[in-house]
Image: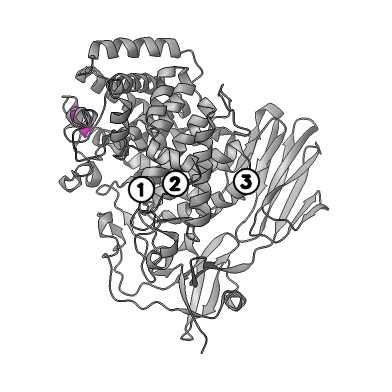
């Protein structure tokens, strides 16, 4: 049994001793720029979200759609089961789907959405300064504090059987559910509320929650703990490592290490790919935690595991869009042809978490390889996941030819990808720019501006990318300042030309690196980066008869029309029925020829980012960027046939 009185005293003491510590961390979000003491400090720092502005474009549109959705949701409905589990009367009826339906009792994810919602509101407040998001953060924190007070413990949860389920899991009894997975979402939401929304109320709830976890798990032997980790547990090691960096409390670091699943950590640290058959999104949050523990402890095995996992998934297990997996699981690379055309490929949560890992690794090692992968997934996975009309998001983004994107309902789904979808579209500004003491990195070509307060400098980026291959930058400076501007020359561009104030200063034919411009910049200086975007056909290494068409970093999808689709039929409740919704017979075209000849046969129509290609049966197929596909059938991979 947990000693509740001891836990209460521990929580109060820890909060009082840690309250003076600056409530910032270099977490995977890393949206606040101030560095913290760490065993291995990041080489780069992120800009505070409030110091980056988005200009008009698809990313700002996506952000605004999500902001509107967040404000339509009712916190009291998300809090319903938390209050019930604490013995309090609910203030509003619970939402549907994963938040309440009995059919999800085998998952027991009730309450996970509240954690994502906290993170999303904290991100939205940090990005926009809109007080409504901060008010929601503090309201939820107050409600969770009331639940802690009523139940007499730091634990807050919403899943059925609540504390009893957690207690059974800690005793090693067989359970139905994933309690630590769901609790991790609440931990992460409270962390982000404390760090991004400066909520001391959320911080107090978080510390008490964490101290409950320390006391609750302390009796477990290492063998018992490892057995418990066979059940999906999210990124508990990540959030506890962040708590250690926030507070200096070594108990959190120790618990983060105990939550690092040795069955996953040890093979990866030895550079062994043992991922076949594993549930993909169970593993990625663990690996994000390994990266955080490397920063917190300096132990090389954590770094080695994280970097090897990233290389394995990004370079050998990913589709052209940057997604991966079939029906949520990694599959053998040699079996690519058996899985690529599944309707249940590329779970959006996996793309979300791979970008969090990519960003964290980039901060440690600013490689263009990381930035190129980030860009590909950002366009072809994250931006592509949102319905531009409703703001709802996908679960899978499969490549079954002639299938369509399916989006969650506003109030009756609440999939895991609904939760990460709330976060995805309010944090676009977090990875456009980075800096060290003397350099500013331009990672993404998105219309925006960044203010570098320490240098009394603003850099404004004006671009219509990807409609035009390049970008223009302009300095606003209080005084002439010597700085290095690092411009990404992406691997997809065979050439990059840099002009400063109209004069060419650099020409690169070595893609996949950063181009460094060091000079004394003056107010009004202009920099132009010109790139080359070509159509390419990317064959799958393990299945050379299957290929995707790309334009620069963009996957070009065949826009195959709406035959057989009723209006609104792509807004669905049950993600498990992917593949059976709107499943009328449909014959998708194939392409004839090899990769080189197919690339040459793609023709622009004259409309922005629109092309055509002749299918093997001579039908003309319209190609547009996959992220622009919505409410119609599509194809992203094509079966290649011989010309006859």
Q: Which mark is residue 443?
A: 3
**Mark 1 vs 3: CB contact within 8 A:** no
Magenta stretch, main secondary structure, is helix
Q: Is residue 91 visible?
A: no
**Mark 2 vs 1: CB contact within 8 A:** yes
**In this orientation, which residue lies closer to the viewer: 226 or 358?**
226
**In this orientation, which residue lies closer to the viewer: 397 or 447?**
397
For disc 3, the neighbor class at 10 Å (few under 14, some 14 to 19, many from 20) is many
| Horizontal and vertical percent position of residue 175 | 19, 38
For disc 1, the neighbor class at 10 Å (few under 14, some 14 to 19, many from 20) is many
Asked if residue 323 is positioned above or below residue 414 in the image, the reply reads below
First in sequence, mark 2 or 1: give its number. 2
Dot 2 corresponds to which residue? 352
Q: CA distance from mark 2 to mark 3?
A: 18 Å
Q: Tag 1's secondary structure? A: helix
Please state if 421 lies on the left or on the right of 231 as rendered.
Answer: right
Asked if residue 415 is positioned above or below residue 235 in the image, the reply reads below
Which residues are the magenta region?
81-85
| Horizontal and vertical percent position of residue 93 | 18, 38
- Is-magenta flag for residue 56? no
Q: Tag 3's secondary structure? A: loop
Asked if residue 477 is positioned above or below residue 199 in the image, the reply reads below
Q: Quadrant of the N terminus?
A: top left
| Horizontal and vertical percent position of residue 242 | 46, 27
Dot 1 corresponds to which residue? 417
């Amino acid at each position: 049994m947990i000693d509740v009185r001891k836990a209460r005293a521990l929580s109060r003491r820890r909060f009082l001793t840690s309250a003076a510590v600056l409530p910032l961390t270099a977490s995977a979000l890393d949206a606040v720029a101030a560095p913290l003491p760490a065993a291995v400090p990041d080489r780069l720092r992120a800009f505070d979200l409030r110091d980056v502005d988005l200009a008009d474009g698809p990313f700002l549109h996506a952000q605004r759609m999500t902001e509107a959705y967040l404000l339509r949701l009712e916190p009291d409905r998300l809090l319903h089961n938390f209050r019930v589990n604490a013995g309090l009367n609910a203030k509003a009826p619970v939402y549907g789907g994963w938040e309440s339906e009995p059919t999800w009792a085998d998952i027991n994810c009730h309450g996970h959405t509240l954690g994502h919602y906290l993170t999303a509101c904290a991100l939205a407040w940090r990005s926009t300064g809109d007080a409504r998001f901060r008010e929601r953060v503090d309201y939820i924190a107050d409600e969770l504090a009331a639940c802690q007070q009523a139940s007499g413990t730091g634990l807050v949860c919403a899943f059925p059987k609540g504390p009893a389920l957690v207690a059974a899991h800690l005793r090693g009894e067989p359970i139905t559910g994933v309690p630590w997975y769901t609790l991790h979402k609440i931990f992460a939401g409270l962390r982000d509320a404390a760090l991004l929304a400066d909520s001391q109320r959320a911080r107090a709830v978080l510390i008490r929650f964490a101290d409950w976890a320390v006391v609750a798990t302390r009796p477990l032997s290492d063998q018992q703990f490892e057995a418990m980790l066979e059940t999906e547990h999210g990124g508990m090691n990540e959030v506890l490592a962040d708590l250690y960096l926030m507070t200096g409390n070594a108990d959190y670091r120790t618990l983060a290490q105990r939550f690092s699943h040795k069955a996953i950590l040890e093979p990866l640290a030895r550079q062994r790919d043992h991922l076949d058959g594993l549930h993909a999104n169970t593993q990625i949050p663990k690996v994000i935690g390994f990266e955080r523990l490397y920063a917190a402890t300096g132990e090389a095995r954590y770094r080695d595991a994280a970097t090897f996992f990233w290389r394995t998934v990004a370079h050998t297990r990913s589709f052209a869009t940057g997604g991966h997996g079939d029906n949520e699981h990694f599959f053998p690379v040699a079996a690519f042809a058996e899985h690529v055309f599944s309707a249940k490929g590329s779970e959006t949560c996996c793309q979300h978490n791979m970008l969090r890992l990519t960003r964290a690794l980039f901060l440690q090692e600013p490689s263009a390889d990381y930035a190129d992968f980030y860009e590909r997934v950002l366009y072809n996975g994250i931006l592509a996941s949102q319905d531009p009309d409703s703001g709802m998001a996908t679960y899978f983004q499969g490549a079954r030819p002639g299938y369509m994107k399916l989006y969650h309902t506003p109030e009756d789904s609440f999939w895991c990808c609904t939760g990460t979808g709330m976060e995805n579209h309010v944090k676009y500004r977090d990875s456009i720019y980075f800096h060290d003491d003397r350099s500013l990195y331009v990672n993404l070509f998105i219309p925006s501006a960044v203010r570098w307060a320490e240098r009394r400098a603003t850099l404004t980026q004006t671009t219509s990318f990807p409609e035009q291959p390049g970008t223009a930058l302009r300095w606003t400076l209080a005084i002439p300042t010597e700085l290095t501007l690092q411009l990404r020359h992406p691997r997809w561009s065979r050439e990059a030309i840099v002009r400063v104030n109209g004069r060419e200063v650099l020409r690169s034919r070595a893609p996949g690196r950063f181009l460094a411009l060091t000079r004394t910049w003056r107010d009004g200086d202009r920099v132009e980066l010109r790139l080359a975007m070509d159509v390419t056909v990317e064959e799958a290494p393990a299945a050379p008869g299957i290929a995707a068409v790309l334009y620069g970093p963009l996957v070009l999808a065949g826009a195959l029309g709406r035959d057989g689709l009723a209006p609104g039929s792509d807004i669905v409740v049950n993600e498990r029925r992917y593949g059976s919704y709107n499943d009328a017979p449909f014959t998708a075209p194939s392409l004839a020829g090899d990769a080189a000849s197919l690339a040459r046969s793609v023709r622009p129509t004259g409309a922005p980012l629109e092309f055509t290609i002749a299918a093997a049966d001579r039908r003309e197929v319209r190609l547009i960027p996959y992220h622009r596909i919505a409410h119609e059938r599509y194809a992203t991979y094509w079966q290649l046939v011989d010309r006859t």
